[in-house]
């Protein structure tokens, strides 16, 4: 398992595209939209940075799913999955070995983007323990869904398209671009079915309302349950994934 972890980490570090989606593009978006909306007299500067920085951090965290799809599909098409299936390595260890590096990358992404917000925009962080636990939950759900998507899709392009729908659709309906309270009533009801909503509301509770871990336990629970569901879907879809693997 740990050999898979090391190999996947090495590949991801060398992937320039992953660096672009994970760090460069989110920072560009944050700078652009803070500049646009910070001049609005109706909204305080603190509210602007608290909406935009966590919002775009959550949105771009979902783009790790593209890298996960590519990694799993390549393993399948190159016959790696078939070879691993013929060894004593349990399938659980294969999934965990592939999952851990992406989980670490999302956590680093969150730390870098929030650190950027603190240094450049004086973003308040609130309770550090609550912030860390919420970020762990975000990384868990994103990578859990990434694994599920990676074993379900037949091609990389299909996975990329589905990721765009999940990331952009979730950002629009989940309140990452615009506070949920400013949306029409029917959209507010839809947003509560999305993990993006519970993530952004959790961050705002910690940062704006000085919330503690107790105040966001429900948010964390929703994210963890969604992530566990993704993991179970990935395991259930594995036999089909293995059948598609080249020998």
Image (spheres, helix red, strand yellow):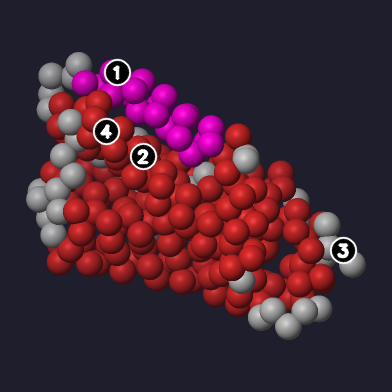
Element type at marker 3?
loop
Q: Is the magenta stretch mostly helix, strand or loop?
A: helix
Query: Does the magenta portion include 167?
Result: no
Element type at marker 4?
helix
Residue under pointer 2: 112
Residue 147 x, y percent position in the rendering: 58, 62
Q: Which of marks 2 and 4 is nearer the N terminus?
A: 2
Element type at marker 2?
helix
Q: Which residue is drawn at 28% across and 61% down?
A: 133
In this rendering, the answer to whether 185 lies above or below 178 is: below
Q: Which of marks 2 and 4 is in front?
A: 2
Considering depth in this image, is 37 or 172 the residue closer to the camera?
37
Per the model, the C-alpha gap separating discs 4 and 3 is 45 Å
Q: Can residue 163 be seen in this view?
A: no
Residue under pointer 3: 246
Residue under pointer 4: 117
Q: Residue at x 34, y 45 (%)?
A: 111
Quarter of the rendering occupied by the C terminus: bottom right
Q: What stretch is highlighted in magenta?
A: 19-38
Q: Earlier in the sequence, mark 3 or mark 1?
A: 1
Circle 3 crowding by C-alpha within 10 Å: few under 14, some 14–19, many from 20: some
Q: Nearer the viewer, mark 1 or mark 4?
A: 4
**Do callouts 2 and 4 mark residues in contact (Cβ within 8 Å)?**
no
For this view, does 13 lie left or right of residue 104? right
Element type at marker 1?
helix
Query: Does the magenta portion include 26?
Result: yes
Residue 193 x, y percent position in the rendering: 37, 59
For this view, does 93 lie left or right of residue 31? right
Q: Which of marks 4 and 3 is nearer the N terminus?
A: 4
């Amino acid at each position: 398992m740990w050999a898979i972890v090391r190999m996947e980490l090495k590949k991801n570090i060398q992937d320039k595209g992953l660096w672009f989606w994970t760090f460069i593009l989110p920072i560009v978006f944050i700078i652009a939209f803070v500049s646009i909306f910070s001049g609005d007299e109706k909204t305080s500067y603190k509210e602007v940075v608290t909406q935009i920085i966590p919002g775009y951090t959550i949105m771009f965290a979902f783009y790790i799913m593209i890298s996960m799809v590519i990694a799993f599909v390549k393993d399948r098409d190159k016959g790696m999955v078939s070879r691993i299936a013929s060894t004593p390595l349990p399938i659980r260890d294969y999934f965990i070995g592939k999952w851990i590096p992406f989980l670490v990358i999302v956590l680093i992404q969150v730390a870098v983007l929030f650190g950027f917000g603190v240094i450049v925009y004086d973003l308040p962080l609130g309770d550090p323990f609550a912030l860390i636990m919420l970020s762990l939950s975000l990384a868990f759900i994103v990578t859990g869904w990434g694994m599920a998507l990676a074993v379900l899709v037949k091609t990389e392009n299909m996975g990329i398209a589905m990721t765009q729908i999940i990331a952009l659709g979730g950002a629009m309906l989940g309140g990452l671009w615009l506070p949920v309270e400013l949306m029409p009533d029917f959209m507010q009801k839809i947003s509560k079915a999305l993990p993006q909503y519970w993530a952004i509301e959790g961050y705002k509770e910690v940062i704006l309302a000085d919330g503690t871990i107790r105040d966001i336990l429900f948010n964390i629970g929703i994210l963890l349950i969604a992530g566990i569901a993704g993991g179970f879907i990935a395991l259930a879809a594995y036999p089909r994934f293995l059948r598609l693997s080249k020998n």
